[in-house]
Image: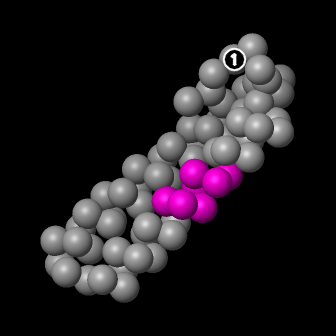
Amino acid sequence: MANEYLIEIHNYISEQKDIAKSRQAEAQENKDRASQRFYEGQLAEWQQMRAYLAEKVDLKTQKYF
């Protein structure tokens, strides 16, 4: 059962990263520097969350992303 939750968590993180990347690209097109930095920070936070999961929670026998 834990694997199913981890898969859902990684899928959610991937979705959120994709959303942040697209919004960051949109902000770059509009030359909105503040929004660019905001989404850059969001991407860094999602990456830190994924790194934490990979280090502390994920099963070593399975790759989730």
Which residue is labeled 1 in the image? Answer: 62
Whether residue 40 appears in magenta in the rendering, the answer is no
Q: Is residue 38 above or below residue 12?
A: below
Q: Is residue 64 above or below residue 36?
A: above
Q: Amino acid at mark 1?
A: Gln
Q: Residues within 10 Å of mark 1 (few under 14, many from 20)?
A: few
Q: Residue at x 69, y 17 (%)?
A: 62
Q: Residue at x 40, y 50 (%)?
A: 18
Specify whether residue 44 is in view.
Answer: yes
Question: Picture quarter containing residue 46?
Answer: bottom right
Q: Is residue 62 above or below residue 17?
A: above
Q: Residue furthest left?
A: 29
Tell me where residue 6 appears, x and y as whole percent: 72, 33
Q: Residue at x 83, y 39 (%)?
A: 56
- Residue 50 appears left or right of 52: left
Tell me where residue 7 appears, x and y as whole percent: 66, 30
